[in-house]
Image: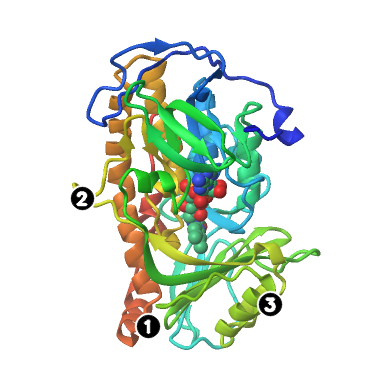
Amino acid sequence: MLTKTLPSRLSSNCFLTSSSFFLPKITSSPHKHLNSCRYISTSSPEQSSGGRKEEIVIVGGGIAGLATALALHRVGIRSLVLEQSDSLRTEGASISLFKNGWRVLDMLGVGNELRRHFLDIQGYCFFLSFFLVLEKVAHQLHRVTIKTLEGKELQSINFKDGDPSQEMRAVERSILLKTLADHLPPNTLQFSSKLAKIEQDDGTGETKLHLTNGSQLSSKIVIGCDGIWSPIARWMGFSETKYSGHSCYRGLALYPNGHPYQPITVQYYAKGMRGGFMPVSPTKVFWFFNYNNPSPGPKVTDPTVLKRQALDLLKNWPSEMLELVELSLDDTVSEAMLQDRWLWPVITPPVYKGGVVLAGDAWHPMTPNLGQGGCCALEDAVVLAKKLSNAIKSKQGSIEDALRSYENERWARVFPMTVKANLAGKIQHSKSLVVCYIRDSYMVPKQGKPGKLLEHTNFTCEPL
Ligand SMILES: Cc1cc2nc3c(=O)[nH]c(=O)nc-3n(C[C@H](O)[C@H](O)[C@H](O)COP(=O)(O)OP(=O)(O)OC[C@H]3O[C@@H](n4cnc5c(N)ncnc54)[C@H](O)[C@@H]3O)c2cc1C
């Protein structure tokens, strides 16, 4: 059975989307126009001998997949999301969402609902040293200081300085995903639906999806939101992702009676490592550290082992960090090998092939050094939905035109971001004493106004 019964929280929603639009036939070549031939009616999924037929299938129910489904829903287009797991992902504790992410969440109509859960972070506090010593976090709200460990004040940073529109919150991934999913129409999200094989039918122009449970679907448009290991990206000719040489531990510490921290991101820079923490809510604090790890071992999932490894790596760090690791909820502690893939012009395949297109990490996996992978996945969602809506509902050009326009607009944004995030990591986690000295003495202290520092969070797009 293809469709797993959805949890009641999802099926209780109203069905708001008009599904009575028409999609053109899609040719199998990315270079042909996609809407040149016949049209089919799409009022409900059809059954045929080849399996179920859909208009738009999104593979992957992560940030990109759910946000894209919701953006399509907001413009009146129905889609089906296939997620391989039997529930929404909780791994990954929290991610920082900056103003570009919040702008998209507002466009999707879920911004204020999410803001209720998460504290508004006021700014950064950096501690710089080759060798960290115990140092109490001392700072004033709204006036964030960068100090050397000897106490020399280097600079004050407040996110709103130079850019009052900046907004940053540490968002629990599980709450973000649940909120997006809760706003989808019933039967949009199918769990336990793992894509095994994808192929294009040159005759119909449709894409066939074979699932591991033996069922098949065909769809006019397939949006690959299947994350960093995307089988769809591989099928489209994208290379494997590249390990950046850095790993990251992260988790969520629970203080049932409230934590003592101000709503500020504290970051420590050390030789070969960078880490820190920020409050998520009055009772939860997100912590992380990235470190230079040229030869990562096998993936560890046992939280007791992960905590022990994290504490070992942090043994000379401030006591706050150690306490945060110890107080972490087991199921929030994880280690990730940081990967990316650069979208070289000409060499890298186009983001679409026939009616198949990528979004989020499936297209542009990036290291998390700028906190932008999830934000960019959200941006992809609204831009892609708008382009498809222009083609499908407003009949402004073909679907191929829409996908090409999506590629052009998003490539110019995500390729530089991927490179910048990678280079930032090289400097932030360098083991070279010279690089650490330059970083700690010049780069971090003199990085200027937050408006400039977070310039990459500026994002504009057409309203949905
Ligand atoms: C350590 C770390 C810290 C990060 N911090 C930040 C941050 O602070 N801010 C930020 O914006 N971003 C951050 N990111 C990046 C962010 O997590 C990703 O960019 C984001 O999760 C991408 O979302 P996605 O939906 O594209 O992919 P994913 O979240 O990976 O979702 C992909 C989904 O596809 C499903 N799937 C995969 N294969 C199949 C299949 N064959 N069939 C069906 N379903 C399938 C998966 O189960 C999953 O649910 C961080 C990443 C890491 C590793």
Image quarter of the C terminus: top left
Q: Report if the CB atoms under discs 1 and 2 are less than 8 Å apart.
A: no
Reading the chain from its start, which is encountered first: label 3 or label 2? 3
Q: Quadrant of residue 17?
A: top right
Neighbor class of circle 3 (other Cα within 10 Å; few <14, some 14-19, many 20+) is few
**From the viewer's perspective, is residue 219 above or below residue 84?**
above
- State the SS at label 3: helix
Front label number (1 vs 2): 2
Front in this rendered view, residue 86 or 420: 86
- The Cα–Cα distance between marks 3 and 1, rounded to whole angstroms, is 25 Å
Image quarter for residue 87? top right
Identify the residue shown where x is 40% and y is 18%: 392
Residue 179 at x, y percent in the picture: 64, 40
First along the sequence among labels 1 and 2: 2
- Residue found at the far front of this picture: 49
Rendering coords of residue 174 (x, y %): 64, 50
Mark 3 to mark 2 CA distance (whole Å): 47 Å
**Do labels 3 and 1 touch, CB within 8 Å?**
no
Residue 378 in percent (x, y) is at 47, 42
Nearest the camera: 397 or 440?
397
Mark 3 is on which residue type? Glu
- Residue underneath mark 2: 347
Mark count:
3
Near-viewer residue (250 or 442): 250
The amino acid sitting under disc 2 is Ile
Is residue 376 visible to us here?
no
Which residue is the site of mark 1?
A: 431
- Which residue bears the numbered disc 3? 323
The tag on residue 330 is none
Where does the image place residue 232, in percent across and percent down from the top left?
41, 43
Question: What secondary structure is found at the residue carrying circle 1?
Answer: loop
Under mark 1, the amino acid is Lys
